[in-house]
């Protein structure tokens, strides 16, 4: 009966669900307790009587700005993309449904605390009220939202733990047919690093004795909305929220600020299972016991090519280590990862109301943040690097970066580390803390956690090209103000090319006199030889380096990945002189073919363009675009801009990297600035679709209107939801 009720709820959410008079009355009553003020950049400033009222206004404003992204996030989170996007999305949905079960989510919701239920109810009410007030909006899948659905997407990072499971391997396992891996999967294509930059500056390094925070998520563009959210019950948060979520994911309140960066902590593990059929059923070995594999059927509805709905049914298996997601060398591979929707949503929300580091850590003690490190600063002058709080205890003799023997009980998870056992850096004497998706061992300079004191599974990322530059900048920074913090955030030095280019120049210099290739490459090598390894719109060496690096990755990225080594150190150590020169030759040929000459300024190639409301953008060389001077984070650009040529284009268009940037200073008074890629609105006809693009280009962050008197000077409209 419980399962049938859950399926009925899903059916009603997809059908044209008509609101009852009681629902309509409740929505309208909520709206009277909320105001939304739009400033001159379209940013909503929401005030509600209680937290639930503020959530109602926040989510209503998000739906106004980009309904498509709000709904899409929850279609995906519930494993229902194939219902609108067709058969190609089946494997993405199956992956989600291995963990996301509406029956369990409804039970989790029923057992959640009353304050959280109130927020979830306000969340659902806001979305349903928006649809009722906007009949022209036609939902693709979810026509009626239920409060429990908020639990399906309870942690705001891009690419959550579930999405670490490789789709091609999942498909190959459940179809029994080999599936080709993408170039990105094999390493043959440069992939923009997922993650972010966070800097926390202590009073000893600031000009006026106030702690400061850089908030710089690197995500797909337009991934988050921006808002100020306040209630009469001590909610007062500003920052970026992933579309559809009712908490500020990266931001600040009147007392503290928090910035999450994707971490390399090893807390998603694969276990190789020895599987045999015994007594007609599949079992797996654990110790000396053969345990039955749990078996269930997952139904994945999808839109067929003719527009009708069809369903594929999958028999899936799970062990004590988790669900089976692929096979390797005759073993079935099960995956263990964190899945705590209630605790994750509690932690995500409660930390936005913390007033100091003690309160923030208390919220974090739910240990439901698995994927993100946190940079923290407060009005008390506190700063910190905080490691992700979900870290299982394991036997350190095993290498959990690869599948471990699931039949050996010594490899099994054995509880969790407490928050105090993690490699944190709290109020370091160095006066700074940072993370750029690199290891924690340099997070606070000389006051960083020491690698020797922790199990090796505390980090699997190692260093990356952004790390040394960030450490150099912060170690030498003194008397910083917000302008100085912005300058550090956009420092254009590219560590990777500083490591790679000297080898190329040396290879060129070793060519014999009169060499034909040497004559052909003399001009490009001269440009690279004179380069200071700083990217800019006018830089010709940057264009050469980007195309050269792209060629190197195409040729050797797969080998670096198979050697389990980051591509830049691998290239420095292993690429031959012939390889380096051949890749540059190919890069120059490609530049000349695409643009008519090799000496192109980087800004003529590297562009920002926003043309449509689609989640996946299209690009057009014939349409207006804006030059961008920063480069890929893969080469060490702190201000990351992941660009590549698109279908039918020669120019490279960015869609990933710096998406939201904010700096804030804490103290008796609070000052903040911010910029969004493009603008706040997802509607091309809106004046706020691209009104921040030039600021994004020049990193001229706009003032954030935190004070009511200041907001009043810049307010354009104040209204209640539904008006």
Image: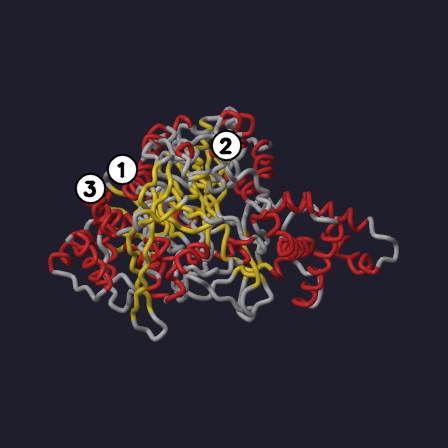
Indicate the quadrant containing the C terminus: top left, top right, bottom left or bottom right. bottom left
Q: Which of the two discs, 3 and 1, labels the residue nearer the N terminus?
A: 3
Could you say which quadrant of the image residue 8 lies in?
bottom left
Report the mark closest to the observer, 1 or 2.
2
Residue named by callout 1:
234
Residue located at (46% from left, 32% from top): 385
| Residue 448 vs residue 167, the one in the foreground | 167
- Which of the two discs, 3 and 2, sits closer to the camera? 2
Query: In terms of sequence position, does the residue under pointer 3 or pointer 2 come before the other?
Result: 3
Q: What's the CA distance linking mark 3 and mark 1?
A: 25 Å
Q: Is residue 163 above or below residue 605?
A: above
User: How far apart are labels 3 and 2 at the CA level?
Assistant: 37 Å
Across and down, in percent, residue 193 comes to 52, 48
Q: Residue furthest front?
A: 279
User: Does 615 sit above or below residue 111?
Assistant: below
**Residue 63 on image: x %, y %:** 31, 58
Residue at mark 2: 456
In the foreground, 275 or 671? 275
* Residue pointed to by mark 3: 111
- Residue at (66%, 58%) from the top-left corner? 601
Judged from the image, the secondary structure of the residue bearing numbered disc 3 is: loop
Say what secondary structure mark 1 lies in: loop
Q: Compare marks 1 and 2 and give the one earlier in the sequence.
A: 1
Q: Residues within 10 Å of mark 1 (few under 14, many from 20)?
A: some
309 to the left or right of 539 = left
Residue 283 occupies which quadrant of the picture? top left
């Amino acid at each position: 009966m419980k399962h049938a009720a859950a399926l009925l709820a899903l059916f009603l959410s997809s059908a044209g669900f008509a609101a009852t008079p009681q629902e309509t009355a409740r929505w309208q009553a909520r709206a009277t307790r909320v105001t939304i003020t739009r400033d001159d950049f379209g940013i909503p400033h929401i005030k509600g009587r209680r937290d639930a009222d503020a959530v109602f206004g926040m989510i209503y404003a998000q739906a106004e700005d980009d309904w498509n992204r709000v709904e899409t996030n929850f279609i995906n989170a519930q494993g229902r993309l194939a219902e609108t996007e067709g058969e190609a999305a089946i494997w993405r949905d199956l992956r989600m449904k291995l963990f996301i079960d509406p029956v369990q989510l409804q039970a989790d919701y029923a057992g959640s605390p009353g304050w959280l239920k109130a927020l979830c109810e306000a969340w659902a009410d806001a979305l349903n009220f928006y649809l009722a007030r906007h009949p022209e909006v036609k939902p693709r899948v979810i026509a009626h939202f239920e409060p429990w659905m908020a639990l399906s997407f309870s942690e705001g990072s891009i690419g959550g733990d579930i999405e670490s499971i490789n789709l091609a391997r999942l498909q190959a396992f459940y179809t029994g047919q080999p599936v080709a891996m993408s170039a990105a999967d094999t390493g043959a294509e440069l992939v923009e690093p997922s993650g972010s930059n966070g800097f926390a500056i202590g009073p000893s390094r600031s000009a006026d004795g106030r702690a400061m925070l850089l908030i710089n998520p690197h995500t797909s563009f337009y991934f988050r909305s921006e808002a100020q959210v306040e209630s009469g019950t001590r909610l007062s948060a500003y920052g970026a929220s992933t579309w559809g979520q009712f908490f500020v994911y990266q931001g600040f309140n009147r007392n503290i600020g928090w910035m999450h960066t994707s971490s390399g902590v090893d807390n998603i593990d694969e276990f190789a299972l020895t599987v045999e059929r015994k007594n007609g059923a599949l079992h797996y070995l654990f110790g000396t016991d053969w345990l039955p594999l749990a078996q269930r059927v997952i139904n994945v509805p999808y839109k067929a090519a003719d527009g009708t709905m069809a369903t594929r049914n999958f028999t899936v298996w799970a062990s004590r280590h988790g669900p089976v997601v692929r096979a390797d060398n005759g073993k079935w591979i099960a995956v263990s990862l964190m899945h705590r929707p209630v605790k994750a949503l509690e932690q995500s929300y409660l930390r936005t109301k913390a007033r100091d580091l003690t309160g923030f850590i208390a919220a974090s003690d739910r240990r439901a943040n698995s994927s993100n490190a946190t940079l923290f600063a407060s009005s008390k002058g506190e700063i910190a690097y905080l490691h992700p709080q979900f870290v299982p205890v394991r036997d350190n003799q095993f290498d959990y970066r690869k599948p471990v023997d699931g039949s050996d009980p010594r490899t099994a998870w054995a509880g969790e580390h407490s928050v105090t056992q993690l490699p944190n850096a709290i109020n370091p004497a160095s006066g700074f803390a940072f993370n750029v998706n690199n290891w924690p061992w340099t997070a606070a300079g000389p006051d960083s956690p020491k690698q020797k004191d922790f199990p090796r599974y505390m980090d699997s990322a190692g260093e990356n090209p952004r790390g040394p530059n960030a450490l150099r900048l912060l170690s030498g920074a003194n008397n910083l103000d917000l302008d100085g913090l912005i300058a550090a955030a956009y420092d254009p030095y590219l560590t990777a090319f500083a490591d790679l280019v000297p080898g190329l120049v040396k290879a060129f210099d070793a060519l014999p006199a009169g060499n034909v290739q040497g004559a052909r490459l003399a001009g490009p090598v001269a440009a690279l030889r004179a380069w200071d390894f700083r990217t800019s719109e006018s830089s010709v060496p940057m264009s050469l380096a980007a195309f050269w690096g792209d060629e190197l990755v195409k040729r050797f990225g797969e080998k670096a990945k198979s050697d389990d080594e980051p591509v830049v150190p691998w290239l420095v150590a292993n690429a031959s002189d012939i390889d380096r020169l051949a890749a540059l030759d190919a890069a120059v040929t490609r530049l000349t073919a695409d643009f008519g000459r090799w000496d192109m300024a980087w800004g003529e190639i590297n562009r920002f363009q926003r043309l449509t409301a689609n989640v996946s953008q299209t690009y057009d060389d014939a349409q207006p675009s804006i030059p961008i001077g920063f480069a890929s984070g893969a080469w060490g650009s702190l201000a990351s801009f992941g660009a590549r040529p698109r279908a039918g284009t020669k120019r490279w268009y960015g869609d990933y990297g710096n998406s939201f940037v904010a700096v804030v200073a804490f103290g008796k008074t609070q000052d903040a600035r911010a910029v969004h890629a493009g603008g706040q609105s997802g509607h091309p006809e809106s004046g706020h679709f691209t009104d921040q693009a030039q600021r994004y280009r020049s990193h001229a962050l706009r003032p954030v209107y935190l004070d009511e008197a200041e907001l009043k000077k810049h307010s354009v409209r104040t209204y209640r939801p539904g008006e």
